[in-house]
């Protein structure tokens, strides 16, 4: 489901959002980075106390921990790759995890938390294993933008959004519109971010958001029904 964005809007056709258009809470998120990074690290300690790829987290696209939500995401992971997530808000959330981070987000990024709780997105710790590629794909709607706070950002890990490649920086926020085609490659080290979905800034009225989200969820249900229950010949 694609919502029409006015061509004269500053938010029209923006694959990667310049910092000048970031929501205010993005800067605050960067200021609170150390607390978030510490809680993330505690959730993925290796056997020797090091921060390691969290093999014990649920597999993205596994479906079981999110009541089937996000099941299609696993199809874009390269053969032999591994993508894990720990949900903080949204379907399958582990409400006991990262309490300081969860409380901060509820206070400072309520639109992201609200969207996740309404079924239009999620707030997760997202980890990609070394040598994992995420194939080119697009989100099913442009109602939301995505923010990544870099937590583990090896130099060879990159994301392409539209026509340009970008790298993550530890403690910095990258904002993009995932309805544009995008893909990811990690290189030889694992990459981790705090991922948030939030309302497309052109959707700034509550009634407009509610109607658009209802339509998007209805189209998503129809699409999933067609995918898993194709019509008989």
Image: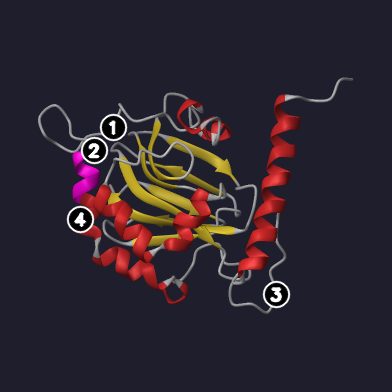
Residue 147, horizontal then vertical, whole percent: 43, 58
129 left or right of 181? left
Q: CA distance from mark 4 to mark 3?
A: 40 Å
Mark 1 / mark 4, whichever is N-terminal: 4
Q: Quadrant of the C terminus?
A: top right
Mark 2 / mark 1, whichever is N-terminal: 2
Task: Please give the residue where the numbered disc 4 appears in the rendered image.
Answer: 35
Q: Of discs 4 and 3, which sits in the foreground? A: 4
Q: CA distance from mark 3 to mark 1?
A: 43 Å
Residue 146 in view (yes/no): no
- Residue at the far right in the pictured view: 233
Crowd tier of the residue under label 3, counting other residues whose Cα lies within 10 Å: few below 14, some 14–19, many 20 or above: few
Task: Please give the residue where the numbered disc 3 appears in the rendered image.
Answer: 7
In the rendered image, the vertical position of residue 83 relative to residue 153, given as above or below = above
Mark 2 / mark 4, whichever is N-terminal: 4
Q: CA distance from mark 2 to mark 1?
A: 8 Å
Task: Please give the residue where the numbered disc 1 appears in the rendered image.
Answer: 54
The verdict on residue 23 being magenta is no
SS for callout 2: loop
Residue 174 has which mark? none
Residue 190, horizontal then vertical, whole percent: 30, 38
Mark 2 / mark 3, whichever is N-terminal: 3
Residue 231, horizontal then vertical, whole percent: 84, 25
Q: Of discs 3 and 1, which sits in the foreground? A: 1
Task: Please give the residue where the numbered disc 2 appears in the rendered image.
Answer: 43
Q: Of discs 1 and 4, which sits in the foreground? A: 4
Crowd tier of the residue under label 1, counting other residues whose Cα lies within 10 Å: few below 14, some 14–19, many 20 or above: many
Give the prevailing secondary structure in the magenta stretch.
helix
Which residue is pictured at 17% across the width and 30% down the height? Answer: 46
Q: Quadrant of residue 167?
A: bottom left
Which range of residues does the magenta coloring cover?
A: 38-42
Q: CA distance from mark 1 to mark 4?
A: 19 Å
């Amino acid at each position: 489901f694609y919502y029409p964005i006015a061509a004269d809007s500053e938010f029209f056709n923006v694959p990667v959002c310049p910092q000048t258009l970031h929501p205010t809470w993005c800067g605050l998120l960067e200021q609170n980075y150390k607390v978030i990074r510490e809680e993330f690290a505690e959730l993925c300690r290796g056997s020797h106390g090091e921060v390691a790829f969290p093999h014990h987290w649920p597999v993205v696209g596994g479906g079981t921990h999110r009541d089937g939500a996000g099941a299609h995401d696993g199809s874009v992971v390269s053969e032999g790759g591994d993508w894990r997530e720990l949900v903080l808000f949204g379907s399958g959330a582990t409400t006991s995890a990262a309490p300081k981070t969860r409380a901060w987000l509820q206070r400072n990024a309520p639109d992201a938390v609200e969207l996740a709780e309404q079924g239009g997105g999620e707030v997760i710790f997202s980890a990609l294993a070394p040598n994992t590629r995420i194939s080119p794909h697009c989100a099913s709607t442009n109602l939301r933008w995505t923010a990544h706070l870099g937590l583990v950002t090896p130099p060879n890990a990159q994301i392409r959004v539209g026509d340009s490649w970008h790298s993550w920086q530890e403690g910095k926020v990258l904002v993009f519109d995932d309805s544009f085609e995008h893909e990811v490659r990690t290189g030889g080290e694992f990459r981790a971010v705090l991922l948030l979905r939030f309302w497309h800034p052109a959707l700034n009225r509550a009634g407009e958001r509610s109607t658009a989200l209802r339509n998007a969820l209805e189209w998503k249900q129809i699409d999933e029904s067609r995918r898993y229950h194709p019509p008989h010949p």
